[in-house]
Amino acid sequence: MSILGFHRANRAKPAPEAQPKDAALAAFLQGYSIEVMPRTAEKVDDFAALMPRGTRVYIAHIDGTPIADMVATAARLRAEGMEPMPHFPARSIADRATLLDWVARYRGEAGVTQGLMLAGGVPEPRGAYETSMQLLESGAFDGFERLHVAGHPEGNRDIDMDGTTKNVSAALEWKQKFSERTDAKMAIATQFCFEAAPVIEWADAIRDAGIDLPVHIGVAGPAKLQTLIKFAVACGVGPSLKVLQKRAMDVTKLMLPYEPTEVTTALARHKAAHPDFNIESVHVFPLGGIKTSADWLTTHTKDPE
């Protein structure tokens, strides 16, 4: 080959045109929320560099976390352009005075007007409250713009000790009725799942039962498979855990990080085909790290430059 021919053969080829994102998935992920804890938030230099301004960021309140750390995290998120939504775990709140103090500090120091009501992860209540319904009834959240409640597409072993979902269903019915007499916007934020079919079946079932609260479906962000299995077992994730177990048996995938692309794409396409589907938004549990989840979200919501 001549020198000229060599250079022609090795001339840089034009870069391929950027492929558009999956339109259904990109639309489905718009308005997503994500979750942090004070100790994980400390590892993030600037939330505004990772996610859009106004992103709702839940602040998980693990039992024993000082309220000062929770409020400081909320204030920081507010300062960096995010919308903080702290957890209020009923069983970790000693009494009404404590509840009112928490709410006053969140509102006064961080401008918080949104909260997720939970029973909490401890088996026995620390004081006056045991359920999220008691928190909602307390009046402490009058004036809040948003009040989210927990949903469990695969059941909740802390509530339904008898192996059925009747207690979870009764709680959702109560929350539905409460939503009809409050001015706050309400939604159901769910535990993370790994398979679309059970989620679709559950979402359709609660709608058929008269629950019209919008659903913010929980998904696990990218993470090592071993990490996800550990969290899934600890959190009582049910039938969809088999998705991870099947993946663990495939040696070609065992060492690859899990990404929620398959489950979210399936839900997105179902939503596109059924516009009245009651899943309104996606909530990401960043089990493999906040930046890792934020990068995955950016990849699937923004077209390349």
Image: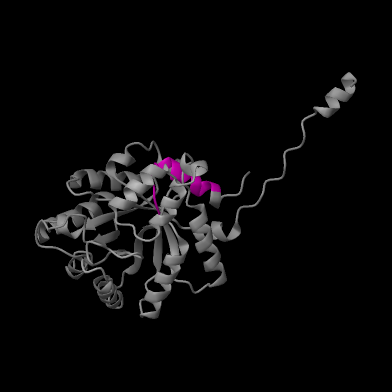
- Determine if residue 59 is in view: no
Where does the C terminus fall, quadrant-wise? Answer: top right
- Rendered view: 176 above or below 123: below
| Display colour scheme | one colour
The secondary structure that dominates the magenta segment is helix
Residue at horizontal 41%, vertical 56%?
Answer: 242
Residue 3 % position (x, y):
88, 19
- Rendered view: 252 above or below 246: above
**Residue 182 highlighted magenta (yes or no):** no
Residue at horizontal 83%, vertical 28%?
Answer: 9
Choose between 53 and 220: the one closer to the eye.
Answer: 220
- Rendered view: 142 above or below 49: below
Residue 182 % position (x, y):
28, 74
Tag count in the figure?
0
Choose between 240 and 128: the one closer to the eye.
Answer: 240
Q: Which image quadrant for residue 101?
A: bottom left
Residue at horizontal 88%, vertical 24%?
Answer: 5
Residue at horizontal 30%, vertical 75%?
Answer: 176
Residue 296 shown left or right of residue 56 in the figure? right
Choose between 29 and 141: the one closer to the eye.
Answer: 29
Residue 164 shown left or right of residue 225 in the figure? left
Residue interval drawn in magenta = 284-299
Q: Which image quadrant for residue 99?
A: bottom left
Where does the N terminus fall, quadrant-wise? Answer: top right
Choose between 125 and 179: the one closer to the eye.
Answer: 125
Residue 118 % position (x, y):
24, 61
- Determine if residue 209 is in view: yes
Residue 224 % position (x, y):
42, 42
